[in-house]
Structures are given as C-alpha cells and as structure tokens.
C-alpha cells in the first residue's frame, strides 16, 4: 500500500485516496474552439511515463482535496507532493 | 526441419533416452535487416510473425523481445477465452480469435490446451441482468453463442457456486458462453515460436528496442536495439504495457495508459471448478487449471505503474468476493501472486492499425482482454502489415476513433449503474 | 524401523509429561505436546507420509520447516473444516488431531498411479504439449478430464468454511522478521531505545537456529538459557510486540509488510469465536530481515526415498522434538554443518554408518570434533544411488578422484536414514520482493542481498552469514538495528546491549562448505532419477532436456519443467535447478540468474486475506429511513449500488408482475407513496453556484428562478450523458442538485474535480446531502388531497406550486422542502424532510392516504410508470454512448452557452451523425407480448446471423393501465422511422414492432399539471 503524503493532511495510506490521472493536462475551453487534435490530446493522450510521473490524487476520505504527486512508475516510490496550482 | 510432435514422437523419445528432441526455436542472432520486424515477443507478436510467414509469404521476419518470449502479459494472465462482447465490431474480432483457438493446437502442432469449459458471467443486480441479456441478444444476432442461466442452472453448471439469497450481492443468474474457456498460456507463446521458427522467422530474445529510425520522408527504416541497429521498412509494435514507450520513439502518442493487473493462484487441489466464473460487479474471475490450481484474477489497480506488482488490498478485495461466491474456498491458500502491465484505452477496445508513420503498425490497448485475442490479434496485425491496410475485422480499431468520437465502448455498456 | 524413535536427549520444544493422541490415515498414534505432526510421525517410526505429484513415488519428510516439499497432509476437524495441503512440519500437534495423506489410491502404501514412475520415460517434462492433439475435440472431452483427475494434491472441502478470520494494521518504527539469533539481537537493541518494535517468527517458539542445537554459549550462559531470558525481556518490554506463528509473506511498496498469524490451528478445541488466522498489514518505517537460510539437498539418484532427510532437519528433529531419524544413519555432506548433526545423533545413541564428505580435504573444528567423537569420516565421497521402497535401506557411496569425477565402484552401505547437506541458501525472498538487488557470492555458492530497497536491511544468515560465527551475526544485527533507529530519528540509544557483554559468544564453531547442482555420477551409468524439485517430480535430466529443447531463459526452464512451481515454491530446489541449467547452458550461474521472487513467501489462506468481508460485512449496506417500514410490509428489495431499495410490495401471494400492476393502477387511479431517499443530493452553494452549474451541466441555469426546478443533464467531456436529475434553485446562491442513485458519488467527484482543478477561482462549495434528507414521493391524482391536511406554511395549490416548483413548509410539523415534481406523469410531490424524521412523516402520509386508496410502490412500478411517460433512466436507456440528442433530451441543452462539460465533443461530426441511435417508443404488433430488454432490432425480417442490426430495446414492460406492452428503444435514425415496422429477432423467435414516439401515456401532460 502506498503511503501518500497529502500536502494538507500529511502521510496517509492509499486507501484514503482516489487516483486522478496525469497532472497538468490543460483543458481547452469551448470558446477557444480547439482543433480535433487539441481536444483529443486533452481527452485521451497521456504521457504514460515510465519513470517520474506527475499525477493527481484526491484525499477523498480525508480533506477531499485534489493535489499532485510525483511518483516513479518503475518503483512506485513517491518523491514529493504539492498543491493544485503549484508546480 | 522441425519434427512433428505426437504420441508416437513421445514413444520414440522415451525409447531413445530423450535424445532426439530438437530445439523448439533457435537462439537467433540479429541479421542486418529484415523484411518485417515485430517488436514484442508475446503471443500476439509471435502470432503475427507466424501468420506473416505462413499466410503472407513474408518469412524474413524478426521478433524482438526485450526479455524472454511470453514473459509479459502472455505468461501473466488468467487465460480466459471468450467472444461474447457487445458491439458488432468487438464480437467479430473476438469471435475471429475464438475460431482460431479452436484449431490452434493442430495448426501449430503444439497442444495449447484450449479447453471450452464455459465462461459464466454472473449478474448480481437488475442492471447486471439487463446488461447480460443485451449481450446475449446481440451475440445471438452476431452468431456468437451466449445464453442466460437462472441461478439454479448456474449452480448446476458450477456446483461450488453459492446462490443463496442471503449473499450481499446475490447471484441473479448469469450469461454462459459454452465455447469460452481457457488455454495454456506458455504453450501459446512457445507453439507460435516453434512454428514461426520452422518457417524461418528469427526469434531474438534479450533484445530491447531503444529507438525507431525514420528517413527524410518520415518512413521507418529500422530499429535501434541493445544488440545493434536492425533495418526494416515494416515494423509492427505489439508491446502491450510498453506500447506507449516504444511508439513514443517514433513520435506517436497513443490514447493508452498502463495499469497493474494482478492475478493469483491457489495451491493445487483435486477438481472443484468445472468452468470459468466471472463477476464484473464484485471483481472476481476464477477457474481451475489442469494442474489443479485455482486461477484468480483481480481488477486493475487504481494507478498507472510499470512495476509488475499491484497493491495487496486489490487482491484481497478479489478474494473477498471469491470467498463469498465460493464459501468452501476460504480454507484454500494463495500460492503465488503477481502483476502484469496492461495497456488500457479509454473505450476498453484495442487498436490494431496503421499509424501516422508510414511502415509503422501497432497492436495494443487490449487491456485485460489480450490473451483471448492472441491468435486473432496476431493474424490481423500480420494482415495489416502485409497489405499496408487493415482487414475488415480490424478496420474500426483505429487510433483516430478517439479523436473522431467513433468509440467502440465495451466499458460504457457494462459499467454504468443507476 | 518402526515403533518408538523418541530419544531421551534433545526435545527442547517438548512437554514430555503431556502425551497427545492423534490419527494418521485412520491409525492412532501417540505424540507429545510440542510436537509437530512431522516429528510425532517420525517418533512413531512413520517415514512414509505422501506420494509425489507426477510419479506417485513414496515420500517422507525431508526438512523440518515449511520448506519441506513432500509431507503434505489434509487436516480434518470436521467436514467443513478440512484443510488440504498442509505441511506436516508446520502442523502443530493437538490432542485428537486427524490427518490424512493425499493424492494416492487406494492407499498410501500401495498406490496404483505409481505406474507413472515406470512409464516416466514416455512422459518427460512438457510431454503434454506434444500430444493429445488429435482428434481436435478430444483434448477437452477425453484427455483433459483424466489429467485433471490425476493432478491436484489434496481434496478441498465442499462445505462453507465456518471459521472466522481477523485482520488488523500494525504501525511501528522497526519491524524485524525472524526471531532467530539475529532477529532477537536486533530486537534487544531496538527495545532499549523505546521505539515501537515488532518482531515476528513463523515458528511457535522463537529462537530459530538456536533451537536446532548449537554448542555456542552466549553472554556466559547456554544458548538455550540466553534465548529464554531474551524472549522474556522482549515480552516484558511495553514497546515490543512479539508475534509467533506469524509468517511475513509479502513485502510491498513503501515498507508495508504483510504477516499471517495462525491463531487457533494448534488448539485441540479452539474457543468459540476465536479467529483462525489474523492478517497483519504492517506499515513499518524500517524493516530488518533476519529470515535465516534454508539447507540445500543434494541431487543424486534415488535421493527422494523416505528416510532421506536434510542433515539440519535431522538435528532439528532431535534437539527440538527428541526424535531419532533412524537407528543406522549415513550422513552425506559438502558442508561442515552436517558434522554437528552426526555428533549429536551419535551422542543420542544412533549408529553413524558413514559420514561421507564430498570434499577431498575437509578440515576445521567440526571435522575434528566428529573424529574425536569416534565418527569415521570418508572424504572425497559421493552417492550414486539408494535402495529401498517405502524407506531407504542402503546408499551407494563412491569415491571422487582429484578432478571430482566418480572413481571406482559403489560401496553399498546399509542404513535406515540418509542425511544430506549441500550447505545453506540464504532466504532472500523478502529482500527480493522489496525489489532489492541480489549478488552472487562465489564463496558460499549463494545469491546474497545486494543493494536493498529503502528502509530494508538484511542481517545474519539471510544476508549471507552462512555458518558464520554467532558473534558476527550479532555484530551485524545490532549495527543494523542502530542504523534503522537513526533513520527514524532515534539517535540516543541508552541501555543498548553490548556485543562484548550480553552478546559475548564462546565455544562457537563457524561452518563452511557447500555444493550446488547435481552430484557427479559414474560415466555411462544408467542413473536413476535424481530429484531437484521433489514435489513436482522434476529431475536433473528434465532440466537438461529443457535446455536441449531450446529453453534458455531460467524462467522458461522453470515453466517448461515446472521446477520451483510447487507449493514449496522451490525453496529447496531453485538453486540446484539453476546450477544444473547453467551448466547445461555453458554459462555462469549469475549470468543465467534467478527467477522472480513473488509473494507470498509461504502459502497464505484466502480466509485471512478476505478477513471480515463476508455476509453483511462484504460491503456496507445503505438503508433509507423507511427501510424497516418497507421490510415489515414484506417488500422485496433489490440492491442498487450499495442501497437496498424496495422493488415491490407483494400482497397475498402476488408475484412481481401482479404486484406491479396493482401498484401502477393505484398511482394512476388515486395515489402512490414511494421512497426516493436514495436519489443522490448535492448542495451547490456560493456566489458562483449558478456559473459553476452552467459550466458543469448542459442546461442554462441563469434563467432558473428561485423556487423553481429544472431537469438537468450532466455529460462527460466526451459528450455522452453521464447523469441526470432535477435541480432546484433554493436561493440566489444555492442549488439543490439531485442525481441518480448510483451516480451520487461519482457526480460529486466529477464536480469537485472540475471545481478544484479547472475552475478553482469559482466561489462554490459542494456538499453531499444525500443522507441528510428523507425523500417521500407522493404521486397520483389524489396526492394533493393526501398531503394538504399534513402541510402547514405552504400552499400546495396548482397556482401557488405548479409543476417544477418548490417551496418550504412544515409537513407533520417537520420543516420540509416540498418539490412539485413527478417521475410518474401524475400530479406529484417529493417531500424532503430531515432523515431522522423520515419514517415518522412517511407513516403519517401513509395514514392520511388510506382514505384515498393510497398504495406504496417500489422501484419496479416506478420504472413502468416513468416508461409510460417516456422518461429515461440514465444507465438503462442510456449506456455511456448516448448524446443528449440520442436520448431525446436535447431540448435541455442551453442555447448560446460559452461552455459546458462535453460541449466541444458534441461538435464532432460523428456525434451529430443523423444515423445515430435515437430514443423511440416501440409497440409490438401483439399487444400481449413483452419484448425482452436488451433485444436487438433489425430493419429487415428473417435474417440469419450475423444480422444487420439498427438498435436495441432499453426498457420494456407490460402496462396494465394501457392494457398492452410498451417499450423504449434506441434505433438508428429512430426519429425518422416513426410508424415504420421493425423486427426484433431473438433465439426464441422474431417479433414485429411499430416505431412510435416514446410517450405512451398522457402525451399532453394534463395529469402532470393538474
């Protein structure tokens, strides 16, 4: 079980969280009239990195906040976590 | 030439002190170039090489495997075979594979132990039942066998099943595909390898692709590997969980994510499970191997990973369901637990297609369903590579369907409850 | 030899004053408290315990611990509590224990399947891949059933297991796995620091190798006394948790280690309610592995007969259980450690017929001690075979020349036990599971831990200190404990024990040596089977054959031969198999490499892994406040998500269809009462609540007046319908959003996702209020009349509270939100009261309704009533591939909105294709025929599979009010097909249907607006 460092609550077991997929994927606004390729990139294309992966988690059974984690997908080691909107 | 396997060959082998057996496939070293290269020596990739050689006359083929053949998801899955998928395109492609399974042992002269012991998919609520019946009707219209069993019929078909009303999620019935079943996973890889090798295919293990070479026009010209550069103008990538890693080398982004998928086996016991039972609602997949082990699959873990291991609580959750559905199994013990890396598309259907890069083809996105498709996927990847165009059966399974909104969404029909 | 093989010497684990009776294969024996089943059987001279998997060769006990590959038994307390495949060396004896041997017929002594052994040359490794292929169907119908019947080990019970299983989490600074000398030394060090320490050991008694017999003295006392005192110290320490009978079986990421604790299998009569096992998930900041080493057998022909045993195991049986392995013993070794076994046995009165050492010139304190004990040592000697059927009777010893080849003829030495030792293999399983690296150590012929995973340290034998002097083990263990504590920030360690004092070791003898791979055999001899993997019957010849057949990866060799894949998972076989394969491949052992170590280290029970999750505890059950009322009235419930919802309320023996027809008729005629509490409810509040909802849902919420309701649709960003529900504007800055029953958590999750990560600047708060409100739907022409007497401070009249309006008031004196909404097409209200008042208000409304002919209705009638009106159910009439237009609700999509979730995707041409499936109504030509939900629809009649299909039936019911069947369906270009005839082909025949509008009842909505 991963021990996930929630930036608001501290380290907690994986069972308290839900996974939110790759972080920092920009969602084009409808008003910007994104091209099919741009919209496809947002909707479906993911880096699926083998290595350091910035990803979103939500402390759903805790503070309920989304935040970001950098995890090595080859070891599942978590290097750091930070709040949404931070880098 | 490879000698044929048979009861007679075993007799002769026994009488000659097992000295007459030959290598099942050669330890090939890479040549400078090939007419076609398959990246990924799992069942799909080996199958593609075999069909390229057998059906399309392309024998100057190399299969490049970074580890040992069949060591990825081919050797890590729960070996369930079925074709009772919902959408016409899916049913057709999986049924194509199932038909190939039915003749595969004799096709390859290798006993892959395809065993049509029946796959029973349980329904635990009204919504499950509606979904199952929709599948049954669609399958009927597509010529795919699938039938509804009442709880009592399910119990008769699978005696250890608990159909008590007192279950938290009682068994309301199930959809049974009698032609569904299991096969021996290693044998599929080895059988394809031996048959492909006999046709001249080079199977090159411990050969990891590190780059894809392209010319000024963007067309592929070969691959870079830890064993040197190998030229080819026709490259098929069949790398399952590592598909995005390999395709990224050619600048192709795929709508895929790689998740851990766990399986486990019990110690061997005398036969108790006559069939395969699946329950999507409570995430339990179980059958019994010829050796006597209960083979149990879990759902995918929540997060992407390449570690080939999953979280213990995911396996525990599956065993909770197994022990409720089969309360006599509670005293059995887990003998081995392992993880694979499955490549999952947003619509849970595969991609077998040409790519934006000329000469580069991809077979990926089979998620948790790849084993059952093995002969079909290999056959269709070979066809697509040989013709530089998809077969009618895989024409819909493109990369572009996500951009265009023409999904083949097997998950949507089953996953939503109300 | 049979009869009493109990020695007066040794027996440190025994309580000799407590005899126990037990049964094996129907025969009664006596053992002692402290025995394992294995030691008790050996004490009775029983060496034949089982049959091998493939050849059904007679097998005895080879090892004393869980690594034993042979002695698998079924332990039966009763029919439901029958446990197959337990290792006799792990089964603690209790009075009345009943054990059976396995996989033999008709008896253990005479097993007909032994014929496989004679036919073995025709069934080499992988034979089943090469035959049984003709005719095509014969594999499944003919061969496979026979292979299956022959395979498998024990028989599983067919009855539900009544035992209980517990689970818990553990948290500590330091987890130490293994309570041998290394683990105890580490624990003593850490205990003094005050840190939380957990120490676990798979055995019933801690001590590990100290229990099997050592000459060493520790801290000035006998090892046994030191052990006793140390365990007392640890038990008394408040910061130390000592778990025995506890196997660490899995090392997971982030230093979570899974332990399985056996709680009651060793008890003659487990107290009622006592769990059988407890699964621990230990979150440790630091882990020390002190898991010891496992003795390696020697691979030579006939090495599997009962009576052939590991030398260390024989010493263990003597010193722990007072059992003599035989009266006349041959020891065959390549390692010093076996000398101690010979010395101890001789002291116990056993005749040492020969001590054969493969090494040409063994030397050192062990050899000297043996010689001075009067034991003749034959150096440079190997075994070329054994004799005996159900027990070894002789071993053929032969000399080795200076090249290590067999020289000269065999000397057959009579014996009734053959004790062997190829040295020890470090138990690196957990280190490796943690993804630590391994390093080949040529000196000890072993893989030892290399770089370890973060927070994981190996000490003692598992770290390569094989046969090392105890003082070195102590140094390593105490240093590792101190390091681990420092990593936890504990630098000050007063009172730590000292190597020079408490752990001072004297009279210790280090041991060395070892052999790996097959023993040399005479050239050209027709050798018997030399087993590598006892349980799976894999021989050295099988491994060589696999290599000849082109299997070059050790993983392939393992899978082809099945070596290391039995229940012992290769604990005694993997290294020998690797050495034989490497030699055959002509490559160095580390080049070939090991197979992956996977969890579990030992088999671990499903029951423990499933734990408490059974029956009602399998998943939480959600019940509405009115559940008990409905249950009392005999409602039939259905699970929907985690809820139990009343499906129908049968009266006087009605079946579902009769009940539903009556319930529907009552709603249409007078009034029905329905529990809608399970609907998801989310309060969206804040200055930007309307803006947020405009962005989330397809609708235009800006135009929704306070006190008004609107049907809302939520898409995903792929443009497909995700959820729906009525949304009410409670005030300027507050919306009450309802969702489908199953959709509530995921809708809230999706809203939070967009709010927190896409539009964090919006001032909006989301609160799940699903369980705060009981929702009582009162539906039917008499609804107003039923409710009015109970309502204060609210006007229910059509003028004051029209359809899709809401107000607040008191219902039965309880503050309520009253929504004028309908999912039935009738005049209707949904009364929301605080959940605690739900049952009371429900009863009051029910009482008021009696005068009006009110009835309760369940979800099934609700489905029929809404289908009559053509209201869709998301998840039934839609399936995650439907746009709002497909579902016939595009009218709800707000015009000129700059943004909503799914808006961009709806622009895709494929999502605007006029041939998309659209919601329509279907009427069967035969009005009595009810289509089956999920049936497929074709435009042309009489097709054979594969057919051209254009849609499917999503909802189908018999409408008692309309006196005919009705159906909703999605059909390609359905709205352009109104009036067309279509066909519904099923396996049971084809129906003819007409396409209609999807509204069958009161299309003008007059009743709704009454």
Image (cartoon, coloured by chain):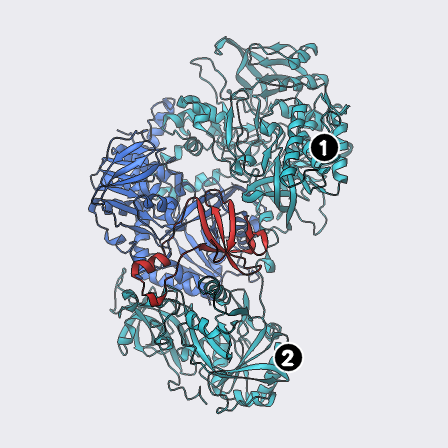
Chain colours: A red, B blue, C cyan
Q: Position of residue C70 (x, y in %)?
A: 57, 31
Q: Is residue B329 visible?
A: yes
On the picture, is C854 further left or further right than C64? left
Q: Nearer the viewer, residue C591 or C286?
A: C286
Q: Which mark is residue C31?
A: 1
* CB-based contact (under 8 Å), mark 1 and mark 2: no
Same chain letter for marks 1 and 2: yes
Q: Nearer the viewer, residue C23 or B195?
A: B195
Q: Quadrant of residue B232?
A: top left
Residue C385 versus residue C1002 in the image, above or below: above
Q: Is residue B323 visible?
A: no
Q: Nearer the viewer, mark 1 or mark 2?
A: 2
Q: Position of residue C457 (x, y in %)?
A: 59, 34
Q: Chain of mark 1?
A: C
- Number of dots carrying numbers: 2
Residue behind mark 2: C840
Image quadrant where one finds the N terminus of chain C? top right
On the picture, is C318 further left or further right than C792? right
């Amino acid at each position: 079980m991963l021990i996930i460092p929630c930036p608001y609550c501290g380290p907690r077991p994986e069972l308290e969280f839900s996974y939110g997929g790759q972080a920092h994927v920009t969602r084009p606004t409808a008003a910007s009239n994104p091209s099919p390729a741009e919209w496809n990139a947002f909707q479906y294309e993911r880096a699926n990195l083998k290595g350091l992966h910035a990803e979103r988690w939500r402390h759903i059974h805790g503070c309920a906040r989304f935040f970001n984690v950098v995890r090595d997908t080859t070891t599942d080691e978590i290097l750091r976590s930070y709040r949404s909107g931070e880098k | 030439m490879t000698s044929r396997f048979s009861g007679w060959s075993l007799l002769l082998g026994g009488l000659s002190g097992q000295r007459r057996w030959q290598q099942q496939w050669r330890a090939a070293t890479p040549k400078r170039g090939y007419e076609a290269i398959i990246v990924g020596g799992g069942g799909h990739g080996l199958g593609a090489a075999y069909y390229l050689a057998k059906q399309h006359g392309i024998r100057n083929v190399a299969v490049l495997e970074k580890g040992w053949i069949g060591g990825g998801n081919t050797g890590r899955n729960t070996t369930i075979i079925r074709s009772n998928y919902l959408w016409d395109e899916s049913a057709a492609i999986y049924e194509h594979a199932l038909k190939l399974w039915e003749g595969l042992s004799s096709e390859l002269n290798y006993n892959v132990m395809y065993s049509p012991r029946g796959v029973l998919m349980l329904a635990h609520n009204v919504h499950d039942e509606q979904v199952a019946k929709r599948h049954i009707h669609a399958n009927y219209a597509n010529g795919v066998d699938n039938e509804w069993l009442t709880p009592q019929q399910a119990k008769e078909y699978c005696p250890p099943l608990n159909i008590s009303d007192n279950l938290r999620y009682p068994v309301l019935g199930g959809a049974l595909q009698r032609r569904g079943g299991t096969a021996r996973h290693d044998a599929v890889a080895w059988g394809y390898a031996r048959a492909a090798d006999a046709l001249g295919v080079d199977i090159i293990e411990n050969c990891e692709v590190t780059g894809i070479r392209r010319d000024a026009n963007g067309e592929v010209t070969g691959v870079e590997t830890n064993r040197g550069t190998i030229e080819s103008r026709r490259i098929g990538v069949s790398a399952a969980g590592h598909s995005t890693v390999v395709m990224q080398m050619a600048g192709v982004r795929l709508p895929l994510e790689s998740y851990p998928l766990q399986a486990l086996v019990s110690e061997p016991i005398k036969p108790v499970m006559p069939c395969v039972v699946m329950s999507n609602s409570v995430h339990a997949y179980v059958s019994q191997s010829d050796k006597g082990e209960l083979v149990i699959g879990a759902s995918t873990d929540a997060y992407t990973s390449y570690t080939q291991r999953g979280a213990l609580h995911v396996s525990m959750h599956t065993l909770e369901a197994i022990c409720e559905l089969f309360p006599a199994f509670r005293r059995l013990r887990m003998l081995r637990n392992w993880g694979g890396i499955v490549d999952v598309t947003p619509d849970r259907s595969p991609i077998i297609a040409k790519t934006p890069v000329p000469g580069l083809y991809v077979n990926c996105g089979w998620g948790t369903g790849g084993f059952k498709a093995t002969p079909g996927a290999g056959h269709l990847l070979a066809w697509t590579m040989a013709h530089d165009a998809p077969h009618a059966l895989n024409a819909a399974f493109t990369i572009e369907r996500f951009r265009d909104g023409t999904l083949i969404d097997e998950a949507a029909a089953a996953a939503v409850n109300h | 030899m049979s009869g009493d093989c109990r020695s007066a010497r040794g027996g440190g684990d025994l309580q000799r004053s407590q005899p126990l009776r037990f049964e094996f294969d129907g025969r009664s024996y006596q053992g002692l408290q402290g025995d394992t089943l294995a030691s008790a059987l050996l004490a009775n001279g029983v060496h034949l315990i089982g049959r091998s998997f493939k050849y059904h060769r007679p097998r005895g006990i080879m090892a004393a611990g869980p690594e034993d590959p042979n002695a698998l038994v079924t332990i039966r307390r009763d029919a439901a509590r029958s446990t197959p495949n337990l290792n006799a060396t792990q089964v603690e004896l209790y009075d009345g224990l009943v054990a059976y041997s396995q996989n033999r017929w008709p008896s253990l002594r005479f097993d007909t399947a032994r014929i496989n052994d004679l036919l073995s040359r025709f069934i080499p490794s992988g034979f089943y891949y090469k035959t049984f292929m003709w005719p095509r169907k014969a594999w499944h119908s003919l061969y496979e059933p026979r292979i299956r019947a022959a395979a498998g080990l024990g028989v599983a019970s067919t009855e539900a297991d009544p035992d209980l299983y517990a689970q818990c989490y553990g948290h500590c600074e330091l987890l130490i796995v293994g309570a041998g000398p290394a683990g105890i030394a580490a624990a003593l060090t850490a205990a003094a620091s005050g840190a939380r320490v957990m120490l676990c050991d798979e055995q019933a008694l801690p001590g590990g190798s100290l229990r099997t017999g050592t000459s060493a003295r520790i801290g000035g006392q006998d090892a046994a006394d030191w052990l006793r005192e140390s365990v007392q110290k640890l038990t008394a320490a408040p910061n130390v948790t000592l778990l025995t009978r506890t196997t660490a079986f899995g090392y997971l990421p982030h230093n979570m280690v899974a332990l399985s604790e056996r709680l009651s299998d060793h008890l003659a009569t487990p107290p009622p309610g006592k769990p059988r096992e407890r699964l621990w998930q230990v979150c440790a900041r630091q882990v020390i592995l002190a898991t010891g080493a496992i003795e390696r057998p020697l691979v030579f022909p006939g090495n599997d007969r009962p009576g052939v045993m590991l030398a260390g195991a024989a010493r263990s049986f003597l010193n722990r259980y007072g059992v003599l392995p035989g009266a006349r013993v041959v020891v065959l070794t390549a390692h010093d450690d076996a000398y101690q076994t010979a010395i101890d046995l001789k002291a116990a009165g056993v005749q040492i017929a020969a001590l054969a050492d493969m090494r040409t010139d063994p030397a050192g304190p062990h050899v000297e001690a043996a010689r001075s004990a009067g034991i003749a040592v034959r150096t440079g000697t190997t075994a070329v075979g054994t004799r005996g059927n159900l027990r070894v009777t002789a071993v053929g010893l032969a000399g080795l020349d200076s090249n290590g080849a067999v020289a000269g003829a065999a000397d057959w030495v009579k014996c009734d036990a053959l004790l062997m030792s190829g040295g020890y293999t470090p138990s690196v399983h957990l280190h490796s599971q943690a993804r630590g690296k391994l390093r080949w150590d040529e000196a000890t012929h072993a893989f030892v831990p290399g770089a370890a995973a973060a927070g994981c340290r190996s000490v003692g034998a598992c770290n390569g200190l094989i046969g090392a002097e105890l003082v070195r083990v102590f140094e390593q263990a105490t240093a590792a404990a101190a390091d681990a504590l420092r990593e936890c920030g504990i630098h000050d360690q007063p009172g730590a024990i000292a190597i020079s004092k408490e752990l001072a070791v004297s009279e210790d003898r280090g041991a060395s040596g070892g052999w790996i791979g097959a023993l040399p055999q005479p050239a050209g001899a027709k050798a018997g089977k030399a087993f590598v993997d006892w349980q799976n019957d894999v021989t050295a010849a099988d491994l060589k054959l696999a290599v000849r057949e082109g299997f070059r990866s050790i993983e392939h060799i393992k899978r082809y031969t099945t070596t290391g894949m039995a229940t012992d998972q290769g604990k005694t076989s993997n290294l020998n198999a690797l050495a034989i394969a490497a030699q055959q491949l002509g490559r160095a052992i580390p080049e070939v490499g090991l197979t992956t170590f996977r969890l579990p280290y030992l088999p671990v029970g499903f029951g423990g892994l499933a734990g408490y999750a059974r029956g009602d505890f399998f998943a939480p059950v959600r019940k509405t406040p009115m559940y008990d009322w409905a249950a009392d009235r005999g409602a039939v419930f259905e699970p929907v998500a985690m809820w139990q919802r009343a499906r129908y309320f049968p009266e006087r023996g009605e079946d579902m269809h009769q009940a539903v027809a009556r319930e529907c008729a009552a709603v249409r005629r007078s009034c029905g009462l329905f529990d809608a509490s399970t609907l998801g409810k989310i309060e969206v509040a804040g200055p930007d609540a309307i803006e947020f909802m405009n962005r989330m849902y397809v609708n235009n919420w800006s135009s929704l007046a306070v006190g008004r309701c609107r049907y809302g649709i939520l898409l995903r960003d792929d443009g497909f319908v995700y959820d729906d529900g009525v949304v009410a504007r409670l005030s300027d800055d507050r919306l009450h959003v309802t969702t489908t029953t199953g959709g509530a958590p995921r809708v809230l999750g999706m809203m939070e996702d967009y709010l927190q990560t896409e539009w964090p600047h919006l001032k909006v708060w989301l609160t799940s209020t699903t369980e705060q409100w009981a929702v009582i739907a009162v539906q039917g022409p008499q609804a107003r009349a039923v409710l009015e007497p109970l309502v204060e401070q609210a006007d229910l009249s059509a003028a004051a509270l029209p359809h899709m309006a809401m107000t607040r008031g008191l219902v039965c004196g309880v503050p309520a939100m009253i929504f004028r909404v309908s999912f039935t097409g009738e005049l209707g209200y949904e009364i929301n009261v605080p959940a605690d008042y739900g049952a009371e208000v429900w009863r009051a409304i029910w009482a008021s309704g009696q005068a009006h002919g009110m009835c309760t209705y369940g979800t099934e009638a609700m489905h029929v009533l809404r289908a009559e009106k053509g209201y869709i159910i998301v998840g039934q009439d839609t399936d995650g591939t439907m746009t709002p237009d497909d579902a016939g609700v595009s009218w709800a999509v707000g015009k000129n909105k700059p943004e909503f979730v799914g808006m961009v995707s709806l622009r895709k041409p494929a999502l605007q294709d006029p041939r998309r499936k659209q919601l329509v109504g279907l009427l069967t030509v035969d009005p009595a025929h009810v289509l089956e939900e999920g049936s497929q629809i074709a435009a042309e009649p009489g097709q054979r599979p594969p057919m051209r299909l254009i849609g499917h039936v999503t909802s189908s019911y018999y409408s008692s009010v309309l006196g005919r069947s009705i159906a909703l369906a999605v059909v390609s270009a359905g709205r352009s097909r109104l009036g067309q005839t279509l066909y519904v082909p099923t396996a049971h025949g084809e129906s003819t249907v007409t396409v209609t509008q999807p509204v069958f009842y009161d299309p003008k909505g007059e009743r709704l607006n009454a």
